[in-house]
Every structure is written in C-alpha cells, then in structure tokens.
Image (cartoon, rainbow, N blue to C red):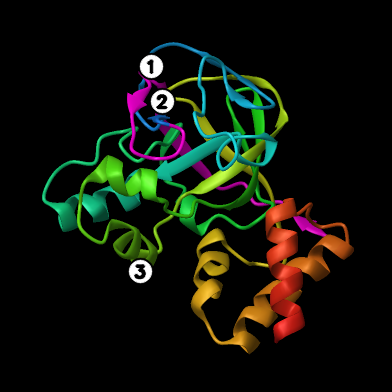
Amino acid sequence: MVTAFPASGTVLAVCRVHALLPDDGAVGVTAIDKRPVEGPVHVRRLGLFADVQADRAHHGGEEQAVYAYSQEDADWWAAELGHTVTPGLFGENLRTQGLEASRAVVGERWRVGTALLEVTHERAPCATFARRMGLPRWVKRFTEANRVGCYFRVLETGDLRAGDGIVVEHRPDHGVTVADWFASRTTAPETRGDVSRRLLDAETAGEVRLSAEVRARATAALAQA
C-alpha cells in the first residue's frame, strides 16, 4: 500500500557541474563543483542535462541520477562551520526548502516541475567530498551529523527550475527514511536487521523498488541479525 502525502516544499536552486577540478583521487578530476543555473533544466534518466560525474564507478547512474540537499541541513552546517553553505557546495543538484531530503522515506516520490523523482538512498560521504571541503575528519563529521541528503531515480523525465514547488505524490508506509537507513550502518545487528526487514518486506509487497545497493546491504544485514 502507498499512502498519498501532499506535503510541499520549494526548489531554491538547481545546480550542475561548473567545471571539472583536479583531484588527488584515482580518476584525477572531480565534478563535485556544482553551481546554480538559471532557467529551466531538463532532467533525463541519468540526471540533469549538461551535468556529469567524473567517477562513474561510484557516482551517477540511474539510481543516483539527482542529488538533493535541504536548506534546513545547510543552515545547521553553516552554524557548525561558521560560514554559509552555498547551493552546490556539497555537490547537490537541488537545494530544497520545506522538505528535508535527509528525512525522505526510501521510495518517496517527489513531483518537481514536470519531472517525477523517486528517493533511492542516502549520500555516503567519500574522500572526494572530504578533499572538496578541506576540513579535518570531514567524513566522520558528516557521518555523525547524519544530514546526508538523498539520491533519486527519475521516473518521469521533465523540466525543473529554481522556484518550482515540490509535492510528495506518495510515500511508502514502511517509514524508513534515508537518515534511518544511513544510521543503521553503525547500529546493533538486531536494529540494523529490523530496518532492513522493513525495507525488504516493503519491496516484496510491491510498495517500493529498492536500488541494487540497498537491497544487497539489507539482505546481508538481515542475514547477520
């Protein structure tokens, strides 16, 4: 069963790659430098038109086509860091307000402009992100804060722009948010197993289509619970 949930928010900024930057990682460059663009942007199955991912072994693809981060979380980080977290600084495509991306339920669907997006999973901080921020223990800090934002797959292609409203067209009843799922990595096996069971049961019931990554992690966690 999928429950209608007409919550709404707003897109504050639409961001895509500004330039590929040199990076000390294996690929040698990074596309994390996202910046706001004006006007409508077309969203395709693999993400925003003219956006790219440099390390396609770990980023991008249909299950990570669009990344959203909320102003609410950015404001929290601004207080922690002592400076504004401008749209795109964390590599996000959408900066939202009124709907907290980290609290989105896995499988939740957002209507943004004429595109329909479905939440797949959280953003896990990586070494590239840490180099981007240039702060000690950044991966650990970001992990502990659990203000991770969320990735989407694109169910319906379309156009979106800054100022567009966001409507949650439906939300699965299992109730596991991306923050819940991310936090379960470091919880006790029985807790991790419970969260995993809820997701796997929801997929079996046809409530949600899990990404291959989430399905594999949930299956492994359940076996260890």
Q: Amino acid at mark 3?
A: Glu
Q: Secondary structure at mark 1?
A: loop
Q: Residue at x 68, y 59 (%)?
A: 214
Task: State left or right for residue 219 relative to residue 108.
Answer: right
Q: Which quarter of the rendered picture does the N terminus lie within?
A: bottom right
- Chain-order first, disc 1 or disc 2: 2
Q: Amino acid at mark 2?
A: Cys
Magenta stretch, residue numbers: 1-27
Q: Is residue 11 magenta?
A: yes
Tell me: residue 114, above or below residue 121: above
Q: Secondary structure at mark 2?
A: strand
Residue 198 showing in the rendered view: no
Task: State left or right for residue 196 relative to residue 50.
Answer: right
Which is more foreground, mark 3 or mark 1?
3
Residue 52 showing in the rendered view: yes
Q: Nearer the viewer, residue 126 or 69?
A: 126
Q: Is residue 39 magenta?
A: no
Q: CA distance from mark 3 to mark 1?
A: 31 Å
Q: Which quarter of the rendered picture does the C terminus lie within?
A: bottom right
Tell me the residue that label 3 is attached to: 144
- Chain-order first, disc 2 or disc 3: 2
Q: Amino acid at mark 1?
A: Val
Which label sits on residue 73? none
Tell me: residue 89, above or below residue 106: above
Tell me the residue that label 2 is attached to: 15
Q: x%, y% of residue 216?
A: 74, 62
Tell me the residue that label 1 is attached to: 37
